[in-house]
Image (tube, rainbow, N blue to C red):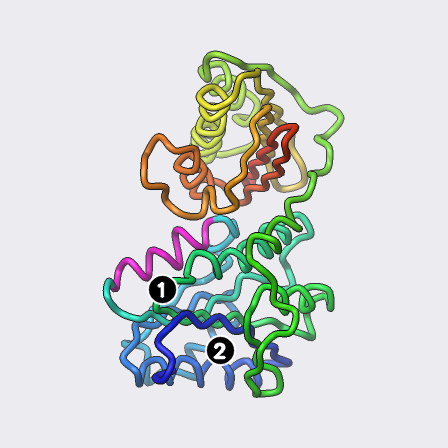
Amino acid sequence: MSEARTFHHPALLYRGSAEYVAGVSAFVRSAVRDGDPVLVAVPGPNLDLVRDALTDLRDSITVADMTVAGRNPGRIIPRVLLRFAADHPGRRVSVVGEPIWPERTELEYPACVAHEALINAVFAERDAAILCPYDVEGLDPAVVKDAWSTHPTMIQDGVLRDSDRYDDPAVTAAAFNRPLPPPAPDAEMLVYEETIAAVRCFVRRHAAAHLPEDAVEDLVLAASEVAANTVDHTSGPGRVTVWTEPGVVVCQLQDTGHLTDPLAGRIVPPHISHRGYGLILTNELCDLVRIHSSPSGTTVRLHKLR
């Protein structure tokens, strides 16, 4: 890594724990030798492998369980990657980030791919390296195929090569701006327009029977942030819908606005009144946020684990 002091974003295609440990350890040891601050943010079982392999570097690296820190893929760029970079101003940072693992759900996956694509836009002018491992045995082949579109370079069989399928980050992210499945048939719905007080009461009332009090308040605050965008930035009424699914409470907000910035909710905007600031907080508060936006309107779906 010492030769190239620009942004480097390879995917590590690995088979089994031995290849995983070898690839991640080589990246981390090289970064430490170069004097980079290093963050390893990977799922818990893989984090244990890394800790065991790098016991001599335990005081030189920062670690995080990605199943916690990155439970919501929309939270990874602002609250994991950019926060780590901000903690080390003026220095190149190196990160092992594994946002996609076999247990990720089909509903989570589009947000994960958008995250991987948008890393390239957010860090394009930054001095950083982010290695993203992909379990080619545990993941669906289509997931591995998508990695070739979201990473400029790939490490396959220990060899670094350019990806011949890498595409513009905004184009790739837009391909995963997909319509959401319909709400549950018995979902409760409220129309709101000029005030968000009714939204707060509605969400609190319908979530209270299914979530602990602090989780209820997280969902209420997240919903009110999204509803405030409707009131402040659109001309028509909004709709809020709440229902439950196995293990989760879902709150959906729809309005007539068109969210055109793919980085909204992933980078802190320059002005607090900007629409993206509320989405930053929403991503922080929820376990998953899915957004579908088009010229006909925007749907924001919030998930809170029960």
Report the quarter where the C terminus lies.
top right
Q: Say whether residue 249 is magenta.
A: no
The one nearer the camera, 228 or 221, is: 228
Q: Which residues are drawn in magenta?
A: 75-88
Element class at badge 1: loop
* Residue at the image position 57 percent from the left and 53 percent from the top: 114
In the rendered view, does 168 fall on the left or right side of 282? Answer: right
Q: Residue at x 43, y 43 (%)?
A: 284
Residue in front for this viewpoint, 275 or 17: 275
Residue 39 position in % (x across, y down): 37, 69
- Disc 2 on helix, strand or loop? helix
For the residues labelled 2 and 1, the Cα–Cα distance comes to 29 Å
Q: Nearer the viewer, mark 2 or mark 1?
A: 1
Q: Residue furthest top?
A: 194
Q: Residue at x 61, y 62 (%)?
A: 167
**Mark 1 neighbour class, 10 Å CA radius: few under 14, some 14 to 19, many 20 or more:** some
Q: Quickly name the residue at label 1.
A: 126
Q: Residue at x 47, y 74 (%)?
A: 48
- N-terminal-most mark, 2 or 1: 2
Magenta segment, principal secondary structure?
Answer: helix
Identify the amino acid type marked 1. Arg
Q: Eyeballing the image, is 101 above or below 135? A: above
Residue type at mark 2 is Leu
Instruction: Please report contact status of discs 2 and 1: CB closer than 8 Å, yes or no.
Output: no
Asked if the magenta segment contains residue 82, the reply would be yes
Q: Residues within 10 Å of mark 2 (few under 14, many from 20)?
A: some
Name the quadrant containing residue 11: bottom right
Q: Residue 168 vs residue 61: left or right?
A: right
Residue denoted by label 2: 49
Front position in the image: 70 or 186: 70
